[in-house]
Image (cartoon, rainbow, N blue to C red):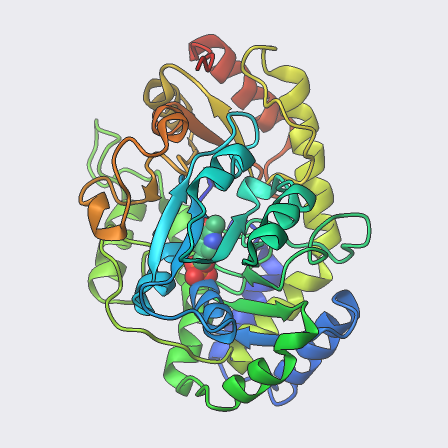
Amino acid sequence: MPTLIGSIPTTQADDLELAKRILNGQENLSSSISVLQKSLEGIFKSKEMYLFNRGREALYFALKTLGINPNDEVIIQAMTCVAVITPILWLNARPVYVDINENDFNIDVTDLEKKITSKTRAIVVQHTFGNISNMKKISEIARKHNIYIIEDCAHLFYTDYSKTDINKYSDISFFSFAQDKGISAVQGGLVVVNNPQFKKIAMDLYLNIEDQNPKQALYNAKYIQLWSMIKKYYFTPILPFQKRITLGKALVMIFRKLGMIKQQATSSVEETPIMNRISDVQSALLLNQLKKCDYINNRREELVNIYNEKLSLEIANKTNTKHLLRYPILLQNPILVMKALQNRQYICGRWYNTMVFPMHENLDKVGYVSGSCPKAEVLVKSILNLPTNIDLEDDEAIEIAKIVNENGKSFKFSN
Ligand SMILES: Cc1ncc(COP(=O)(O)O)c(C=O)c1O
């Protein structure tokens, strides 16, 4: 089976079986949402929690709960996903971009202080790839300027946060269960309200949020079924004597055209605000993943250890983070290495090879001022993500490291 970093990398045979049972009407879904809520209450120690169709809808809810108004400035880091900017724009608020650190790709606290103005109302703190941001320092800055903090935990999910700074310093945290996230329901989002001041506001706001229609909910189970098929044929050539045109790629095109599978983020900003609750189908899929969450994170840790050990010293990741959603490296020639890996059926990724992924043009439309985050502008050109997919075997990770070492030219960041 080829390795594809982007689509359902945490989905295994049991998830596929569950998706099929759901599609055949053989799964009783009546209590899946309440069981999921109970399980999450155990993890988040009964803090206020709200479940959504997608992570960006959870962020929209968080911004609304904090009372963000048109023209308010919301700080976010450069090198992020368009899904993070979209809800800020839905509120007609202004995204303000802060530069990043070259090691963990998280917000640079020195630049953060410089970008705060009298109009700044909130900071969205992204834990990029699972690297946890310096929450203590950020909260000191936020307190000094009377600014709210929203934690973007889209790149990590644990069953125990007690030994981390997650959920401790922010007003609200949000999570994503999208197709390429830590655990996945194909789509899904969660808000955890950490500051009791916002409990009642959030509760009232959630009362008005609508359920999805049943057809929309089934999309997630269907996606798993379709992508499992695509994966099987991803590298099967349609015509003899060539490798480029494959059955899997043709299926992706057809299913996308028919709207049966959607890209999670595109280069255009979604215009219309939307906020739906999570469905029973997503909840059932997510519960199955939640059972495997520790196993998935442990496997990520094993793969990260292999990359750390086998990649050359100049190329290996410089953080101590073990549960990396993707293993980021910096190279002078990321595209060449990506192609070399693809020839061995390893599809890697490039989160985020632009300031607001996957937008490569018209960044002014999402409020990015060219030159305002110089470090990020350099780093986006060199980034490559190696897979930490759970089904990746040890010897495959070793082979990936070998290909990278043989083909990659290490990139050294200099100011
Ligand atoms: C850092 C980050 N935050 C938030 C999101 C939004 O997640 P969703 O796709 O569930 O809306 C994404 C999506 O890729 C992301 O990468």
Q: Where does residue 270 sit, x and y in percent of width and height? A: 26, 64
Q: Residue at x 40, y 30 (%)?
A: 376
Q: Where residue 344 appears, x then y in whole percent? A: 43, 25
Q: Give the vertical position of 64 relative to 313 (above or below).
A: below
Q: Residue at x 58, y 38 (%)?
A: 388
Q: Nearer the viewer, residue 260 or 233?
A: 260
Q: Residue 9: where, in percent of width, then height?
A: 52, 48
Q: Quadrant of the C terminus?
A: top left
Work out whether residue 43 or residue 23 is closer to the camera in this orientation and state it.
Answer: 43
- Number of numbered tags placed on the structure image: 0
**164 on left or right of 175:** right
Q: Position of residue 126 (x, y in %)?
A: 53, 48
Q: Is residue 45 visible?
A: yes
Instruction: In the rendered view, tell whether residue 132 sits above or below residue 310.
Output: below
Q: Residue at x 33, y 40 (%)?
A: 236
Residue 368 appears left or right of 395: left
